[in-house]
Image: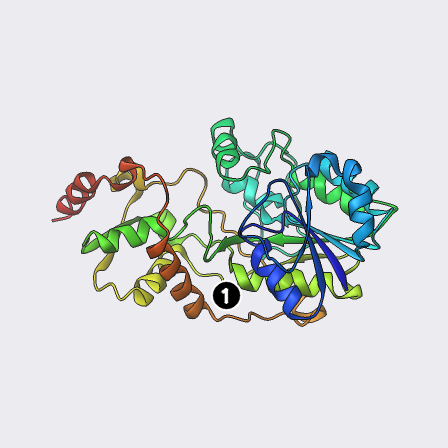
Amino acid sequence: MRILLIGGNGFIGSPLARELRASGHSVAIFHRTADRYLDEDAVRIQGDRNRLFDHLEQIQRFSPEVIIDLILSSGEQASQLMSSSRKVARRVIAISSMDVYRAWGVLHQSEPGSLEPLPLTEDSPVRTNRQLYPPETMKMMQSIFSWVDERYDKIAAEEAILNSSGAAGTVLRLPMVYGPGDPLHRFFPLLKRFADGRSSILVAHDLAAWRGPRGYVENIAHAIALAATSDQAAGRVYNVCEEPTLSELAWQMRIATQAHWSGKFVVLPRERTPKHLLQPGNAAQHIVASSERIRAELRYEELVDIDEAIRRTIAWEHNNPPATISPQQFDYDAEDAALASRA
């Protein structure tokens, strides 16, 4: 197949392009800037994803059968994608997020009402409040993910993809993705504490119990590849995540085991936990999703098991620490004081 990746030279796009090419597919990557790390065997189309119509001639020259958009931010972008795609491709795969669910709004306290029942399936209700993230969070996201714009709304993007009369759309709702290349460096705060010789790591009680969806980047890429190459996925929505969903404490303990850290985790009441270790929101709302649909329909299963995935991520983090480190995130004096108060 001929497959076009929009934003295909990033965290998820890079392993996705490798898998597709290894499976014998022809891949083109539409990207904004020249990138020396781009797959040399892929066709390159340089341009602005917000001006797809300006690049239709180049896209038509490649003649993709499927377009995968990894960097959709808004309904406006999705509508433009579908209008462009009907001229060149028969199917579109859109990458969305589990933050579309009402449960995520309850977690962030932007959605009124009771806790959402679990597990979340593709038919679970989505948020009624489209503004999930406060302005400061949006600025942080934009500083890390250049494709996020002021109109960020994955719900609107999904609607445009699935309701189009042109190319058939497929939506994949992703979890928190970790692995080599993670722009959020999700493992770093824990690994730095290990490296700094901390013998105890504190976790607030509500966060320790909270369960949230995760997925290793190469496994996520594999799920996208399956959806892109299966006509059965047309018109479908899929959750993608590891199962079972571990609690935050169990997750951190698993990382500690693979990092060979011999210290102990200490769970504290929220009111006795240092402020820099607290997470905002209603932790009583867990985000436990079912990925049964994609496993049953597309025969999805993880290529890399969880312990190997954690080991690979640890190795990458050791060699690629974040460019900037907030000292407030590692207030060891406050942590020691909280530990001493237990005596």
**What residue sits 45% from the left and 41% below the top?**
282
Q: Nearer the viewer, residue 38 or 211?
A: 38
What's the residue type where badge 1 is placed? Pro
At which x and y percent is residue 151? 64, 30
Q: Which residue is mark 1?
A: 244
Total residue callouts: 1
Res 114 visible: no
Give 124 or 67, whichever is nearer the viewer.
Answer: 67
Splitting the image into 4 quarters, where does residue 158 fall? top right
Q: Is residue 207 left or right of residue 181?
A: left
Quadrant occupied by the N terminus: bottom right
Q: Residue 205: give x, y in percent of width and height.
A: 33, 49
Q: Which percent across, then down, holds residue 267?
A: 27, 52
- Residue 49: in sight, yes or no? yes
Q: Relative to the observer, which residue lies in front, 22 or 223?
A: 22
Q: According to the image, what is the colour scheme of the structure? A: rainbow
342 horizontally vs 203: left or right: left
Compared with 211, 127 (above or below) is above
Q: Secondary structure at mark 1?
A: loop
Residue shown at the point (50%, 30%) measured from the top left: 139
Q: Is residue 113 left or right of residue 283?
A: right
Q: Nearer the viewer, residue 84 or 241?
A: 84
Which residue is located at x 63 percent, y 52 percent? Answer: 173
Q: Residues within 10 Å of mark 1 (few under 14, many from 20)?
A: few
Residue 120 locus on image (x, y percent): 60, 55
